[in-house]
Amino acid sequence: MATMTAAQQRAQAKVQYDAFVAACPSRQLLDRISDKWVTLVLAALGNGSPHEAGTDCAGEPRAMRYSELARLLAGVSQKMLTQTLRSLERDGLVTRTVTPTVPVTVSYELTGLGLSLYDMVRGIKSWAETHMDDVLAHRGAYDARVG
């Protein structure tokens, strides 16, 4: 039996990633990126422009301070935003930059990997906003039939 190098083992494991298999690590990643706060943080950092009603996330990506993100993401708690940003940083989707000012300035920015995911998230966010009326109509019709 031939011995595999670490690089060969990683390559073989990558080929074997299958989210339909219960033990596959890609399931954890899918769980993470399907979280609403992750989606909204990625959309905010990728949009880069101040939020206006009806914007389609067409701005340029830019770094944002924690307080900017907190204001933009209505309803997110401090604890949840902190956990979300930490998990995104751990996964290599966001970088955290600390600038030694008084007070200290901390900003977050999408990495190249985060930008590649943002392109997909932007489409999902746009789809949800465009089709929300249709979904609400279907929910109402379903509830009338079943309830």
Image: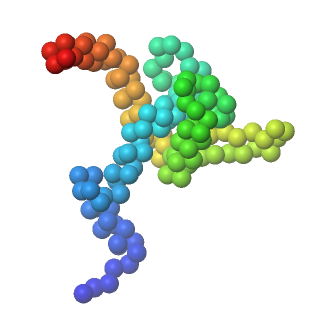
The residue lying furthest to the bottom in this view is: 1
Name which residue lies at 47% across and 47% down: 113
Q: Residue furthest right?
A: 102
Quadrant of the snapshot with the C terminus:
top left
* Direction from residue 59 to residue 65 in the image, left or right: right
Q: Residue at x 48, y 23 (%)?
A: 58
Q: Is residue 98 visible?
A: yes
User: Compared to 33, does 53 lie above or below?
Assistant: above
User: Nearest the camera: 29 or 12?
Assistant: 29
- Pinpoint residue 69: horizontal percent, then vertical percent: 60, 30
Residue 51 coordinates in the image, percent (x, y): 56, 19
- Note whether 9 is above or below 54 in the view shown: below
- Residue at image position (44%, 33%) is 36
> The N terminus is located in which quarter?
bottom left
**At which x and y percent is residue 88?**
52, 46
Q: How is the image coloured?
A: rainbow
- Residue visible at 68% across and 45% down in the picture: 97
Query: Number of marks in the image?
Result: 0
Q: Is residue 79 left or right of residue 123?
A: right
140 sits to left or right of 46: left
Foreground: 27 or 126? Answer: 27
Q: Nearer the viewer, residue 142 or 126?
A: 142
Any part of residue 109 in sight = no
